[in-house]
Amino acid sequence: MERCNCRESQLSGILARYDGQDGALLNVLQDAQDLFGYLPEEVLEYISKHLGRPYSEVYGMVSYYAHFNTQPRGRNLVRVCTGTVCHIMGAPQVLARITEELDISIGETTRDGTFTLGSVPCFGACSHAPVIMVNDDIYGRVTPSKVAGILAKYRSQEAGISISSLD
Amino acid sequence: MTKNINLTINGQHLTVPEDTTIVDAARQIGIEIPTLCHLKDTNEIGVCRVCVVEVKGARNLIPSCITKVTEGMEVMTNSPKAREAREMVMNLILATHPKDCLTCDRNGDCELRTLADKMGIKKVDFGAPVKDLPLDDSNPSIIRDQSKCILCRRCVSVCNEVQKVSAISMINRGIGTTVGTAFDRGLADSPCVFCGQCVNVCPTGALTERYNLREVWDALNDPEKHVVIQTAPAIRVSLGEELGEEPGTIVTKKMVSALRKVGFDKVFDTDFTADLTIMEEGHEFLQRLTENGKLPLLTSCSPGWVNYIETFYPEFLDNVSSCKSPQQMFGAVIKTYYAEKFNIDPATIYTVSAMPCTAKKYEANRPEMNSSGYQDVDAVLTTRELGLLIKEAGIDWKNLEDSQFDEPFGEGTGAGVIFGSSGGVMEAALRTLSEVVTGKELDNLDFKAVRGLEGIKEAELTLGEHKLKVAVANGLGNAQKIMEGLKTKELDYHFVEIMACPGGCIGGGGQPRLSSPETRQKRMEAIYKADLGLPRRKSHENPAVQELYKEFLKKPLGEKSHHLLHTSYTPQDI
């Protein structure tokens, strides 16, 4: 934790929230990822030390859940469902369009840090297939032609322009 | 009061105490149900499913290694459903397992292979690709080949529950699940202390020691080299197991004959430097006791323990005895005193040690272990490797004659022998300290309070005018308890012996595999039997040690001792 002391004080705040609770590790990891966007090594080391859980176990939990990542992410996370129903309903075409639009593949982040692209085995929203999620927003029945519009919304939010009037 | 439970297994009626598992109940009537992940008292989690049986009325097949018997239970171990399921489970495990058995380190003693044979597996279905994961050879002690791992979790349980080191855990998910360190790094970049308890329980070739047999053969075949071997106290009661003898057979004299036939120029006994350790460490303790030095004094013979305290309790490093371990003292003495005395160029001396230990390999490779001007110990073999060396040399073990160790380091006392069992270093030290302090001969040499396989033992005794409180711990989980107690000052001792492995060196990570509590018990009994069988049982009465001081070292803790036999420790940052 040499790089940033502010991280340390933020983390101690999270740990204080779960002080003395059994099985706090998962919650602490979630809150830490919400705070930093990802779980870098020094954060995991700090959590391991201060929760008194072995570092190997902390990493074991992080590596188990697809939700956690140890690499920095873009400011917006685009996730495409690759489940069977979405696949049949056109997810591969949607994914191809997103890949083209952002010029990155699954697991990568755009050079400007705006988007990270990921996939999910199933969102459990098969009736809306094909489904994608951007951050916490869910989009159902997506077609390749809708992709540019969806992504544009997040680009312009970043630029500070509200396009809600266009919806 | 224990209740009795009536049940039938394969139609046979039997009555067993409650809390008996189905596997154990079946064994009582001569039925062996296969198990794989199961390790009594350590890994009782029933994850591999190799042991499933059919129980009348149960919805699913039952893992028999963790399921307790119930009244009226009807177990069928060989019903078609149970047999097919077990075969399927075995097939699934074997599907992704490498098939290079002929050249695998575990060829001959692989539990997985033995089980496949016992279960009559003749063909592996499923065209699944074989696991192909990178090899971890980051350290001098342990090699991890995760391609051969079957995810039984024995190693994880031993590392986390018994040793409390927690260097490894289950990582990733689904088909990608492996056993690994944080960020899947090599063991060298983890808190691993190289005790090798994981290696001792691994059923496959996923965890092995780093083999040094090749280097040893090269040295033996080099006419320029003077090759000497030292053999640790604990291996004389366990080596036999690698060569077909019962646990607890004392094979000291046969071992010496075998090693001479293998071609070692000299065969020496580490008991000699165990005695030397007592002289140095005993005087170090007296010095600390009488000159207000740091107490408790913590022993330093066990390299797994030294790694542990450097990593987890560096604030206590001043309490650790500055004495090198007997292995390292031996190396240093060989390349100085011995070389001088027999006019041998130390550059041509190659020192091998046979140890019950994997951490000894790490210790021998420590950069500071070269006070003789050369690496003190050139190669370390585990008990298992020593067995292999004897087999490779084609020696007819069964018909070997007895012979004696070579002079001048062939003489060890009973005090040196008991180093091999938990409590032995303490007892050996007390035998010598009592006589050195009081100047009177002890009537009774047996300090039974510090003996035994119990994890933590305590004793109070009088040493001249001093009342002493001592403790002995074996297994790092127990060491942790002692260290936490010292930290909070709830515990207070003058002298503490700690060995990294359960039972001490007799349960070392380099010992014949699956050292069960019963096996350790037999090895321990043999150690004390060997002690009783020796003419001298006190370190300070070892004539070779006395001569070494007279001719070379002059006195315990003297200048030469300080330079050659003592060391310092470094906090490990993990």
Image (cartoon, rainbow, N blue to C red):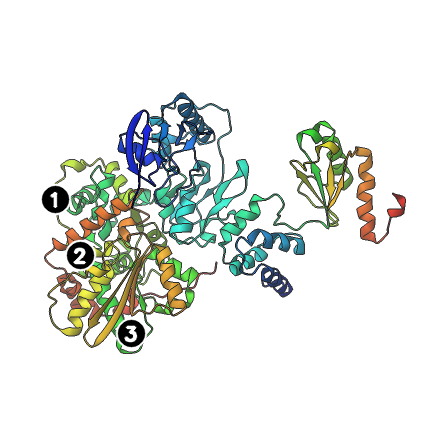
The mark nearer the N terminus, 3 or 2, is 3
Residue B181 in the image: state x and y as whole percent. 48, 49
Name the residue at the right extreme: A165
Query: Which circle, 3 or 2, is nearer the viewer?
Result: 3
The mark nearer the N terminus, 1 or 2, is 1
Position of B112 relative to B373 (above/below):
above
Amino acid bearing label 1: Asp
Q: Are marks 3 and 1 in contact (CB under 8 Å)?
A: no
Kindly identify which chain the residue marked by label 3 belongs to.
B
- Horizontal side of B392 relative to B573 (left or right) equals left
Residue B208 in the image: state x and y as whole percent. 37, 42
Of B395 and A135, the residue lying toward us: A135
Residue B556 in the image: state x and y as whole percent. 22, 70
> Residue at label 3?
B288
Image quadrant where residue B513 sits: top left
Image quadrant where residue A43 sits: bottom right
Callouts 1 and 2 on one subunit: yes
Residue B113 in the image: state x and y as whole percent. 36, 30
The mark nearer the N terminus, 3 or 1, is 3
Distance (Cα) linking label 3 and label 2 = 29 Å
Question: In this view of the protein, can residue B110 be seen by the observer?
Answer: no
> Residue at label 1?
B402
Amino acid bearing label 3: Arg
Kindly identify which chain the residue marked by label 1 belongs to.
B
What residue sits 38% from the left and 39% below the top?
Answer: B38
Picture disc at residue B409: 2
Query: Which circle, 3 or 1, is nearer the viewer?
Result: 3
